């Protein structure tokens, strides 16, 4: 057997380069790039190995480790999990900066390969710079923080361990059931050690999708439930996108005359004006979807993990006779909420259901009810997103202006605060992957880095990043990366001078405004900070401007679309106003005892809502 003598780092890189994937008949690299911020834990080993192949496997330099991992995750999501990226850091803070991103990927079932540098396996120079020492266990390092937020975790302490660990890592990254972040901790001395690796280890390997087939007995049970349904509802989750099943969903819903509501991850699976689309579901949902969910007797949940924003903290399915059917590749998610688990790929599952249902369709009166309600809801959307021409702009009005500027080839990106709620309710997505809102982890700071990842995955599409001032201040450095890489983003920065969403929630729970808006926080002097976001974005290389109204925003968006580089538009918004229509209850515990009468009253209301909560 022929061998090749390589360092562990060189072998790792060459193995990754050998992994291919077939996409629409084209052979593409499974990992088309590596994000890297070098330090003493990875620059000499992995850095040197990446330099050798830089013309074949690009290495991208970022400004923040968490942000570069966010970009990698967004790339994987926009690629429908068919391709992914790797990220490497130094030891210590470089590594722990990625832990938040690993958690985000874990929650959202998205693949990313994390390669943090580690301390010396030999322990000869311990303690090294940035080493975290556990007083009772010398095997623990900062990289152990990744264990609970990784689907697969390993520490490579001998070069030959790559022979078994790397194939396992790739299997997890591509597994539709266990898909998520993989962490391989790489001690810096082992990165540099050589080993005689078998040549076969670096042979090209083409990966094909492995759809999960349908269990016949579960299928028969699901069909029996659906055939007896009088008021069925479909909830489309992110799994519809990852299974490339958007067209299948459209055909299934039309053939069987079932209304379709969308989660945050599922939104854009159907066009907003599709005859069966009843809008967003849950806490940030449309009044139509939530009303239908309340009276539905069967709910077919496709590719969703049914988090509390989707289920109204387990209150939204008010019909006591309601049955849930969970079509999901992951048994862990299919078995939630007392559902009948239908474990299968979304496309295979819907096709099998449709074939078994035959010509069965829900009563025409049920779909007519949904369509009439949607006519009213569309008027609600238009009212909230229209330019009133008075006062500070609302989040909804900004969303409307951006939506009008976007075309069918655009993608909107957002993550945290009040904006995801307004977008979920009000944004009109025209085609799959046109809506990219990270709301599984609701991670502030994801937006700009995520937008960069989306642009890298979908370079021909215009990417609009809608971000609040709170998230912008948390993480904005990848504007400079996007400019450096010539990846154009249109940034719309809404300045409500604080954390407006949580300020509203605080008061909704009876609390006094405190430590959320800048004016309600501790500061010294005569006035709160006045932050010039336009100047800041310009300092990072973007073209930027500040506008004073929705009409000015609309003109600025035209200039941004015509620009060839990153373009930032800043607008002041009202922190108090949000769309009142739609939505449902969300379980946020209110204190039982308080000196504030408002809190006591809110706790009484809270107990009333709790009575409607299913266990």
Image: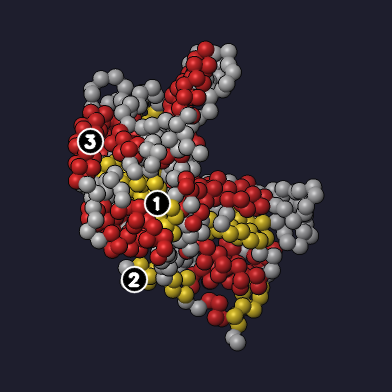
Instruction: Please state, as top left, top right, bottom left or bottom right, where the N terminus lies in the image.
Output: bottom right
- Mark 1 or mark 2: which comes first in sequence? 2
Pick the front one: 401 or 439: 439
Query: Mark 2 — residue?
Result: 26
Give the percent coordinates (x, y) of residue 62.
49, 50
Give the percent coordinates (x, y) of residue 324.
40, 48
Structural distance between the alpha carbons of marks 1 and 2:
36 Å
Task: Find out whether the residues at labels 1 and 2 contact each other: C-beta distance under 8 Å.
Answer: no
Image: 255 above or below 525: below
Structural distance between the alpha carbons of marks 2 and 3:
44 Å
Residue at image point 43% right, 53% down: 340
Give the percent coordinates (x, y) of residue 304.
42, 49
Query: Mark 3 — residue?
Result: 373
**How dense is the environment of label 1, judged by Cα within 10 Å: few (below 14), some, or many (20 and up)?**
many
Give the percent coordinates (x, y) of residue 287.
30, 33
Residue at image point 19% right, 46% down: 364
**Dot 2: what SS?**
strand
């Amino acid at each position: 057997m022929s061998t090749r003598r390589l360092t562990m780092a060189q072998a790792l890189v060459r193995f990754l380069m050998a992994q291919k994937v077939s996409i629409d008949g084209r052979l593409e690299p499974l990992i088309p790039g590596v994000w890297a911020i070098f330090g003493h834990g990875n620059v000499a080993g992995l850095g040197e190995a990446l330099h050798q192949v830089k013309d074949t496997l690009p290495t991208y330099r970022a400004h923040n480790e968490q942000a570069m991992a966010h970009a990698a995750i967004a790339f994987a999501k926009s690629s429908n999990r068919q391709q992914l990226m790797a990220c490497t850091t130094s030891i210590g803070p470089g590594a722990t900066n990625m832990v938040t991103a690993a958690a985000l990927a874990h929650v959202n079932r998205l693949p990313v390969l994390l390669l943090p540098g580690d301390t010396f396996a030999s322990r000869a120079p311990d303690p090294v710079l940035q080493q975290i020492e556990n007083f009772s266990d010398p095997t623990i390092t900062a990289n152990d923080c990744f264990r609970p937020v990784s689907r697969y975790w390993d520490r490579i302490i001998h070069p030959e361990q790559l022979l078994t660990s790397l194939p396992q890592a790739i299997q997890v990254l591509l597994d539709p059931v266990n898909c998520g972040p993989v962490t391989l901790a790489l001690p810096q001395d082992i990165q540099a050690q050589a080993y005689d690796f078998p040549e076969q280890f670096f042979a090209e390997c083409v990966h094909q999708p492995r759809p999960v087939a349908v269990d016949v007995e579960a299928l028969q049970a699901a069909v029996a439930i659906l055939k007896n349904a009088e008021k069925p509802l479909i909830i489309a989750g992110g799994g519809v996108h990852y299974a490339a099943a958007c067209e299948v969903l459209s055909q299934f819903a039309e053939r069987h005359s079932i209304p379709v509501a969308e989660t945050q991850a599922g939104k854009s699976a159907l066009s907003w004006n599709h005859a069966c689309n009843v809008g967003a579901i849950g806490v940030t949902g449309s009044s139509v979807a939530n009303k239908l969910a309340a009276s539905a007797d069967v709910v077919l949940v496709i590719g969703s993990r049914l988090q509390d924003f989707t289920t109204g903290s387990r209150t939204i399915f008010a019909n006591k006779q309601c049955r849930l059917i969970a079509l999901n590749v992951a048994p862990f998610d299919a078995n939630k909420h007392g559902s009948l688990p239908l474990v299968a790929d979304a496309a295979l599952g819907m096709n099998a259901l449709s074939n078994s249902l035959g010509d069965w369709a829900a009563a025409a009166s049920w779909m007519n009810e949904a369509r009439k309600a949607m006519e009213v809801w569309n008027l609600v959307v238009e009212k909230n997103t229209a330019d009133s021409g008075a006062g500070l702009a609302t989040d909804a009005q900004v969303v409307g202006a951006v939506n009008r500027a976007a075309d069918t080839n655009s993608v909107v990106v957002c993550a945290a605060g009040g904006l995801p709620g307004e977008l979920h309710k009000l944004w009109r997505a025209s085609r799959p992957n046109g809506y990219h809102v990270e709301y599984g982890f609701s991670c502030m700071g994801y937006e700009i880095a995520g937008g960069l990842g989306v642009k890298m995955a979908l370079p021909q599409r215009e990417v609009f990043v809608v971000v609040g001032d709170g998230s912008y201040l948390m993480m904005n450095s990848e504007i400079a990366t996007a400019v450096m890489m010539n990846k154009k983003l249109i940034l719309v920065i809404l300045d409500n001078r604080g954390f407006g969403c949580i300020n509203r929630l605080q008061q909704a729970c009876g609390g006094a405004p405190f430590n959320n808006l800048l004016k309600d926080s501790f500061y010294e002097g005569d006035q709160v900070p006045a932050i010039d976001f336009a100047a800041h974005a310009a300092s990072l290389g973007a073209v930027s401007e500040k506008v004073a109204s929705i009409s000015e925003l609309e003109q600025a968006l035209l200039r941004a679309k015509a620009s060839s580089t990153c373009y930032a538009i800043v607008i002041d918004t009202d922190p108090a106003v949000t769309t009142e229509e739609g939505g449902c209850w969300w379980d946020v515990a209110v204190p039982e005892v308080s000196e504030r009468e408002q809190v006591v009253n809110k706790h009484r209301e809270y107990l009333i809502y709790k009575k409607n909560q299913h266990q």
